[in-house]
Each structure stands twice: as C-alpha cells, then as structure tokens.
Image: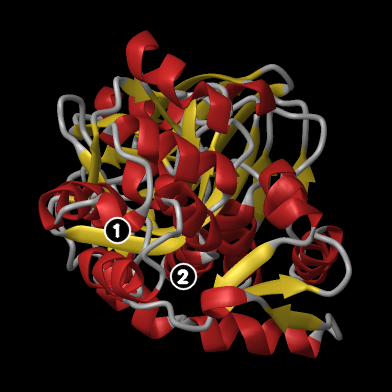
Amino acid sequence: MQHLDVMVLGAGAAGLMAAVEAGKRGRSVLVLEKSAKPAEKIRISGGGRCNFTNLHCTPANFLSQNPRFCVSALKRYSQRDFIARVEAAGIAWHEKTLGQLFCDGSSQQIIDLLLADCAAAGVVLQTETVVAGVEQRDGRFCLATSRGDFDCASLVVATGGPSIPKMGASGFAYDLARQFGLAVVPPRPALVPLTFDPTILEKLRPLSGVATEAVVSCGSTSFREALLFTHRGLSGPSILQISSYWSPGREIAVNLLPDGDAFDLLRAARSDRAKQELHTLLSELLPRRLALLLCVEADLDGRLADLSDKKLRAMARLLNDWHLKPSGTEGLRTAEVTAGGVDTDAISSKTFEAKRVPGLYFIGECLDVTGHLGGFNFQWAWSSGHAAGQAV
C-alpha cells in the first residue's frame, strides 16, 4: 500500500488546482483520474478555446441553497488571480461578450499550464484508475483502486457532477458524501436546452435554426442573450442561463424586443406606414420565419391601418411577453453542469473540509454551487481548488 499526504480524486480544473497548491506546500500528492486523459472538460470548453474565467465574476453569479458559501473562496482567489497566472505562463487571451475570457490559442494551453504546475510541485498524476472503495481507518483514508491500494491523510473529492456522461461523468462524489453521512441537494441538469411537448414543438418546428437576441425570464430572474430555436425546443445562451432557475411546471417569458415597448412601436408604425403589412414590419425587427409565426400565433396580419389598438396590443404582448411552458430539459446528456450536489452546510467555506469528517474535502462542481454560463464555473473550480489546496 502506498502512503501519501494528499490524494485528489478527479483530474479536472478543481482537482488539478488543489493538487498544485498542496504540492507547492510540500505535501506528497497523488491525483487519480478514471479517464485516459486529464481535464477533458477543459479541452472541449469554449469551442476548444476554454472560457477560463469572467471579468465580472461575483457571488451573485452562483446558485446554491447557501448563497453565501462561495463568497470566501472567490474573494481569496479571484478571476484577477487566475488571469495573472495565465499571463505569467505567456498564454494570450481575449475578451468576448459580457466579460468572457478565452485563450487566443486552444484549451490545451490551460491544461498544459496546470500539468506543468503539477510537475513543478511534485504532484503525481495517474490516469485510467477506478476507485472501487473508500474507508476511513485510524484517521486516514484507505482507497482500493483498479491499480492498487493507497492511503492518505487528506482526501480531496473533485469528480464533478453527472453532466455529460459520455465523458465519464458520474455521481461518484454524491455516493461518497452519503457514505460519510453528508447530505446531498438533489442534483439536476443546469445550463441545458429546454424541451416542449409535441403540440408546442410542432408549432415551433418551422423555426429550427432561427436565432435572435431576447430577454428570457423565469420568475424574477432574467437574462439577455441570444436565443436559438432547435428541433427539440429552445437553446442558446439566454435559455441555458434561465434553465438553471427553471423547474417543471413553470413558464418562461420571452421578450423579443427588449429595447422598447412593442405597442408604442406598432402604433407609431401604423401612423407612419399605414399601408404596410404587419408581417412585413415584423420582418424588419425579427428573423422573417419568426415574424410569420408570431402573426399565425396571434391570428393577426394585414395592413397596419386596419389593425385596432386592441389587436396591436395582442401582438405587442407576444413580442414583449411571450409565455411558453417547457415540458423538460435535454437532461444530463447535454447539460454543461449539474446544479445541486453535496450540501454546503456540511462543508467549511474556508477550507472545503467536511465539518464532521476531518481530512475529507469536496470542491468544484460536485458541491451545491453552480455558476452562470460564461466562465463562472471554471472560476469556481480555481477558487475552491485553491482554497482546499491551501488547507490539506
């Protein structure tokens, strides 16, 4: 049996960050990864360029039953700290919309940075290793794996959630948490496309491939970004964002003209261009296929001059406040992350150690902390991994 100070389960963003920080502090560290290659989620992220953080990251960009839990870690290791690390490695980056930062090159640059830091800190990485069981004996953790037995003083769980199972994702962290008596907030797909029942889907089918900017709301939460109609329902950044707040049975509201009052616009057009057809006007404001569908949905068309205020208001409601009830989501198969997870009430927000199980740590996506789309979940991985690495 091999004896170590620290073992990290999962060679993703959070796990590699924790391993580096622990190794820098002189700990003997072994990272176990069940896949053939480390950091596969980093590799595929951001279209292969890795949206590695966001300039505007704050605690408000995260969902959790305990919204204050993320504050300490984000403050102690912020987006500015990781940007400095990226720049020190000579990795060029650029900002896209809404503060999202991407590598000029490829995601592999971030992976190479982490692996180089691991090597410099003496961290050992072992891939294609499956953990068969974990026990605690005499204050140490004993692990039976497909490549032998190990024991360690500190065990860091960074295996993520079950989203994108084709990449090997699973609920391992939840099972381990329950084994040691920790509660788990029921996991659910997040940052995921929304689906609709056959009746609505048939109505929306002609719009597959159409994209437009919109404000999408669920309750008091709203996001303004692109919306995309698909053959399964709705996707695009605004939909992925709101999906983290949606729950079955709730409606979403879509504002297709977020920059103005649609009724005022329609009434002004009736005055200025009375002979123009309604669908022609709408096609100037929205993609043509969407404009035509809205006319069918409202059962309205014809010359603007012939449309009463009552009819214009009916169309304006669709334009500014179109209500749709999703039937579900595309599920964990396509979800970018998993919401819910290990209950943070059981975890120290400073060290990420389980309060009742000394030496056991949970970091990253497996916790009940979920970021918005746009680099926030990577920042949570860096911040939580750094905090645990400083404590183990």
The percent coordinates of residue 168 (x first, y second) are 64, 25
Comparing 282 with 74, the one in front is 282
| Element on which disc 2 rests | helix
Report the residue at 47% width, 65% height from top. Answer: 376
What residue is pinned by disc 1? 305
Please tell me the numbered disc located at residue 383: 2
Left or right: 247 as drawn, with respect to 166:
left
Left or right: 381 as drawn, with respect to 16:
left
The percent coordinates of residue 49 (x first, y second) are 78, 61
- Position of the C terminus, as image quadrant, is bottom left
- Callout 1 touching callout 2 (CB < 8 Å): no
Q: Label 1 vs label 2: CA separation? A: 59 Å
Q: Amino acid at mark 2?
A: Ser
Please tell me the numbered disc located at residue 353: none
Q: Amino acid at mark 1?
A: Ala
Report the residue at 28% width, 76% height from top. Answer: 72
Q: Residues within 10 Å of mark 2 (few under 14, many from 20)?
A: many
Can residue 188 be seen here? The reply is: no
Quarter of the image for residue 121 reads: bottom right
Nearer the N terminus, badge 1 or badge 2?
Answer: 1
Report the residue at 81% width, 38% height from top. Answer: 37
Task: Identify whether 275 is placed above or below 331.
Answer: below
Left or right: 82 as drawn, with respect to 36:
left
Comparing 291 with 365, the one in front is 291
As drawn, which residue projects farthest toward the top? 198
Comparing 7 with 369, the one in front is 369
